[in-house]
Structure formats: structure tokens, C-alpha cells
Image (cartoon, rainbow, N blue to C red):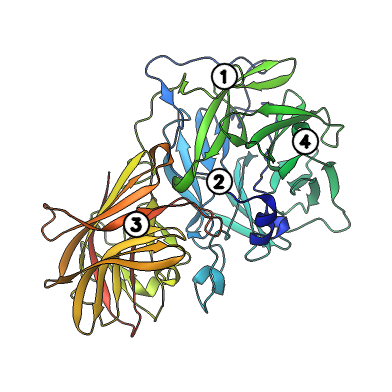
């Protein structure tokens, strides 16, 4: 990730939001359900291998940061961060830790505010909801998150993590990068903070901090094992309990160094804690422990990888003298003793022809709206077989437009294409295919003075520039965006076609860059916005990803 130094980061984000950490705990096996990091037998064992083809790192070459993973029986569930997107807090399922499928979201919208709705000139880019905690306790699944945008902490519960429904509880304040912890005596805690790790007790109904209690300091300086010359202090906490010992994983960033895993352990939650460096290789850090049903152990972590975003890695774990030892001789392996990936299509990204056999069939889970949608102004029914986006107001930029529908770009290369019918456009309307980040690019159609033009727009030096314009005499045009993320090349190009067969390059090369204001990897987006008068519409025939 292209991060500024710590002094610049403090200017971009409030100090309390600088850390991206989360904690969740694992208790010894007491029932048929095995929670993340638990074994069904005598305790930690060395990582082994599975027969057949081998997986490779990264296990997901797409923006899936801040992972929290649990295992229930032989099924793994993972939550992640998608910040300003709706629905939010994606839940994925896997049977092998490598091949993941989206199965749910914790919420449809986080809250109803101007920033989350892209209203009154406000936005929640890079904010919304941050790192989540994922737990399974006494037959219920818990997903908790927090938001600097709303100043609240959120807890979602369900009996069925794949089908819901979810029950929402929220309260102030926003407990930064927290994790639920269910103690054996029935008490419930949240662990939170950056640099200094704190703990508060919650009311039994999880409705807020328990009256009469005060926060406690668990670890004064979570980055201490990595030395005193720290640029980004200890964050990304995840707490585990394995064989009656607590293990706390953190990430810190020494000045002039790389993202580093630190590990603390203690016999009691209140301490005393002892710590050491857990991994310092390729900047792969921030995550925690997970065990397989066979008793093999892995650390799930992620790596900042330029414009594609923050991408998940798995690192084998062995145990020595009661400590988890990460990697092969301290290195992140390229290959893993796990089944090979079958690709991200259709589990995490998916093509959509917008044809629905059932009248009220929803959008595939791979789709997320940029901020909260305005459900009055999009439809799969007004023209069956098409997605219709209607403008509901006037906007000056695609970044402020509502109802932009997105999916992740992915590496090492990915391509997204669509076809649009612009016969319903009004003067001043813009519609097309977007690569979404602060330094965005798009190809599409502009209507000006009663004429339509095929255009390519890219942001250069912070300013959107129209790189090419061609007259459009018809109403249908096919658009494609091709992205290259291998070796952090981070380049993209756009093409257009009038028949869907013969493609012509449009505009120049877009140099993509990961920026903190958006804090997210690039996404394909379908958009339509008005600059003069509302009420125009564009019909999208399909979205195809490869």
C-alpha cells in the first residue's frame, strides 16, 4: 500500500483512527463446533500438508483486508472490510481456506447519514465501517464493527450466518478496532485501541459499556517487541486463547522498515504479557491464527499491494516452546500445502447478464453500491434483462454520484466489460464503466448540446482530464476496462466497440494508485449521473468479468 509517513498520516486521519486492528478470541473445544484456531484434540501441532495440487500466495489476489476467520466444524467463515460500500461487512465461506464464496453481509446499510448517502456534498470514502470481529458463541454468530463516520459501535447477531436474518445493536462511543470476547464466567468484553490496547466490559445484552465500569489497559505498548523507532504503532490486534494461553497478534511499522507481525502471550488476560517479533517478510502482516480440523495451523495475514489493494496470504505455523512460529525459516512461502485455488469467479466476483428468472431475484452478492443506494433510482424490472440507472439529482463528479454499482478488480490481470443503451439520456448526463478510486478513470458516453460522445476520462495530478472524445451516432456502445496489477504495474486501459466484437483502444493509459482518502483497492463500477437536470436513464445490458 502506498502509505505516507506517520506525520502525514496524522493529518489525513484522526489519531484514534490510524490503527487498523481487531481482536477475537478462541476458547478450548467444549462442543462439536470448533471455533477458529481450535483443535479437537490435545492442542497445537505442526502445520502439515494436504494431498493434491497446492495453493499459492496470495490466496486471494484482490482487496479483502482486515480478515477475521473462524472455523465452525469443518467450515471456515471470514469477515472483511469494505468501508463505504453497501451492503457491508462481507461474509465468505470456505472448506479449505483457499477457495472462498460470498454468502452474506452483516448489514444492508450501516446507517442513514448524509456522509453515507453521498448527500449535501459529504462522503464516507475510506471510512464507513472498519475492521470487524467475527465470533461464534453458544449457537449464535456475532459480527461487530465500528465507525468513525457515525461515532458508533455495531454488533450484528444471527443464528444462520449464511441466510440471516441479522439483529443489529449499536451504541456510542465508537470503540476503535475492537473485538468481542466472551469470558468463561459469562462476562462479555470488548478489546480495542491503537498502540495501547484497552478492554471494557459490556452489558449482558451487548447494548453498551456496562455502567460503573472503567477501561483497563492490557498492553501499554503493543509495538515494543519491534523496537523504539516505530512509525506506525502496534495495531491490527487479534486475540486468541489456545490451551489456556492468550496470544495477541499485532502489526506495527518500524521507521525505514516494513509491516511487522508482533505476538504477545499471557496466562491471564490481564497479564503480565511477554512479546516478540512474529514475522518480518514482504510486509505480510495483520491477522491471526486458524487451525484446520486435522490440527494444522496457519496465520492469515494480508499484504499491501498497490492499486489492487490489500490481499490475503496464508503462512504455515509451527509451535515451539508454547510460541506460534510463522513461516518457513521466517519467510512467507509461495506454495502452501492446501488445495489449489479455483479462481475468484464466481465466488468473489461474477459476471451478470441482468436477466432474472424470478421476479424479485436480488443482485449477486459480488455487487456492492458505492455508499448507500437510492433504491428509487435503479431497477431490474423497468426493462427486463437490463440494469436501469436513473439520475435523481445533479452532481458535479462521478465520485459524488449515487447508485454506482461496483465489484472488485483483481490480479494479476482482470477485465470488466459492459454495454450501455443511452437512448434515455438527458443533456449533461454521463454514464459508463468506471475504475473507482480517488485517481479514477472511466469510459462512457457524455451528452452535450443534444449530441452524444464516447469519451475516456482519467484523473491526472488530482484533476479529471478528458483524454479522448469521439462522436456517437447510435445509442448502444460496448465498453471494456483492462487492468494489470502484476508486480504492482498498476496500469489500466479502456476500449470501446459498436458491435461487441471489434474493439478499439480509447484514450490513454490510466496509472492507478492506492490512496488513503479512499483506503480501498480499485473497483469496476457502473454509473450514471446528471450535470444539468435529473430524470435521464441509462440501461446496462450486461457486466462481464474475466
In terms of sequence position, does the residue under pointer 4 or pointer 1 come before the other? 4
Q: Which residue is mark 4?
A: 184
Mark 2 and mark 4: span between their CA atoms? Answer: 21 Å
In terms of sequence position, does the residue under pointer 2 or pointer 4 come before the other? 2
Q: Which residue is mark 2?
A: 159
Mark 3 and mark 2: span between their CA atoms? Answer: 23 Å
Q: Nearer the viewer, residue 182 or 493?
A: 493
Mark 1 and mark 3: span between their CA atoms? Answer: 37 Å
Q: Which residue is mark 1?
A: 296
Mark 4 and mark 3: span between their CA atoms? Answer: 41 Å
User: Is 337 positioned to the left or the right of 244 in the image?
Assistant: left
What is the x, y in percent for residue 78? 53, 40
Which mark's residue is nearer the viewer, 1 or 2? 1
**SS at circle 1:** loop
Contact (Cβ within 8 Å) of mark 4 with mark 1: no
What is the x, y in percent for residue 47? 57, 17
What is the x, y in percent for residue 72? 55, 32
Amino acid at each position: 500500500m502506498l502509505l505516507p509517513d506517520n506525520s502525514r498520516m496524522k493529518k489525513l486521519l484522526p489519531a484514534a483512527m490510524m490503527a487498523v486492528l481487531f481482536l477475537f478470541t478462541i476458547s478450548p473445544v467444549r462442543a462439536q463446533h470448533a471455533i477458529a484456531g481450535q483443535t479437537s484434540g490435545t492442542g497445537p501441532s505442526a502445520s502439515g500438508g494436504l494431498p493434491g495440487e497446492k495453493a499459492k500466495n496470495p490466496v486471494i489476489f484482490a482487496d479483502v483486508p482486515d480478515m477475521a476467520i473462524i472455523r465452525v466444524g469443518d467450515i471456515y467463515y471470514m469477515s472483511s472490510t469494505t468501508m463505504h460500500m453497501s451492503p457491508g461487512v462481507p461474509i465468505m465461506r470456505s472448506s479449505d481456506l483457499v477457495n472462498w464464496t460470498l454468502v452474506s453481509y452483516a448489514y444492508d446499510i450501516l446507517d442513514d447519514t448524509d456522509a453515507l448517502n453521498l448527500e449535501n456534498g459529504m462522503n464516507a470514502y475510506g471510512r464507513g465501517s472498519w475492521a470487524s470481529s467475527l465470533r461464534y458463541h453458544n449457537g449464535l454468530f456475532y459480527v461487530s464493527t465500528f465507525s468513525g463516520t457515525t461515532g458508533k459501535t455495531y454488533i450484528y447477531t444471527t443464528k444462520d450466518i449464511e441466510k440471516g436474518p441479522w439483529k443489529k445493536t449499536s451504541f456510542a462511543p465508537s470503540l476503535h478496532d475492537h473485538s468481542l470476547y466472551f469470558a468463561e464466567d459469562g462476562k462479555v468484553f470488548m478489546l480495542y485501541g491503537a498502540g495501547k490496547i484497552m478492554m471494557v466490559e459490556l452489558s449482558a445484552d451487548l447494548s453498551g459499556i456496562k455502567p460503573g465500569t472503567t477501561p483497563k489497559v492490557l498492553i501499554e505498548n503493543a509495538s515494543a517487541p519491534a523496537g523504539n523507532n516505530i512509525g506506525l504503532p502496534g495495531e491490527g490486534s487479534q486475540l486468541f486463547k489456545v490451551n489456556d494461553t492468550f496470544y495477541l497478534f499485532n502489526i506495527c511499522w518500524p521507521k525505514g522498515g516494513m509491516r511487522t507481525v508482533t505476538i504477545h502471550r499471557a496466562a491471564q488476560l490481564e497479564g503480565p504479557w511477554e512479546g516478540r517479533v512474529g514475522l518480518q517478510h514482504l510486509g505480510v502482516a495483520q491477522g491471526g491464527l486458524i487451525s484446520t480440523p486435522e490440527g494444522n495451523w496457519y496465520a492469515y495475514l494480508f499484504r499491501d499491494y498497490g492499486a489492487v489493494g490489500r490481499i490475503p496470504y496464508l503462512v504455515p505455523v509451527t509451535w515451539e516452546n508454547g510460541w506460534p512460529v510463522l513461516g518457513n525459516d521466517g519467510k512467507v512461502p509461495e506454495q502452501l500445502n492446501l488445495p489449489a485455488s479455483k479462481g475468484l469467479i464466481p465466488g468473489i466476483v461474477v459476471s451478470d447478464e441482468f436477466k432474472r428468472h424470478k421476479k424479485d431475484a436480488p443482485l449477486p452478492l459480488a455487487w456492492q453500491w458505492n455508499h448507500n443506494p437510492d433504491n428509487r433510482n435503479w431497477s431490474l424490472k423497468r426493462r427486463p434483462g437490463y440494469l436501469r440507472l436513473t439520475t435523481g439529482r445533479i452532481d458535479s463528479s462521478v465520485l459524488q454520484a449515487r447508485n454506482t454499482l461496483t465489484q472488485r478488480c483483481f490480479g494479476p490481470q482482470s477485465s470488466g466489460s459492459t454495454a450501455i443503451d443511452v437512448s434515455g439520456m438527458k443533456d449533461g448526463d454521463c454514464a459508463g464503466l468506471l475504475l473507482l478510486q480517488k485517481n479514477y478513470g472511466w469510459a462512457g458516453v457524455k451528452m452535450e448540446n443534444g449530441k452524444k460522445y464516447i469519451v475516456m476520462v482519467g484523473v491526472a495530478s488530482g484533476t479529471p482530464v478528458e483524454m479522448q472524445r469521439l462522436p456517437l451516432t447510435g445509442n448502444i456502445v460496448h465498453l471494456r476496462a483492462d487492468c494489470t496489477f502484476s508486480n504492482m504495474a498498476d496500469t489500466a486501459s479502456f476500449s470501446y466497440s459498436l458491435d461487441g466484437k471489434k474493439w478499439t483502444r480509447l484514450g490513454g493509459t490510466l496509472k492507478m494508485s492506492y490512496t488513503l482518502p479512499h483506503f480501498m483497492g480499485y473497483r469496476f463500477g457502473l454509473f450514471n449521473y446528471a450535470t444539468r437536470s435529473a430524470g435521464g436513464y441509462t440501461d446496462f445490458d450486461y457486466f462481464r468479468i474475466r
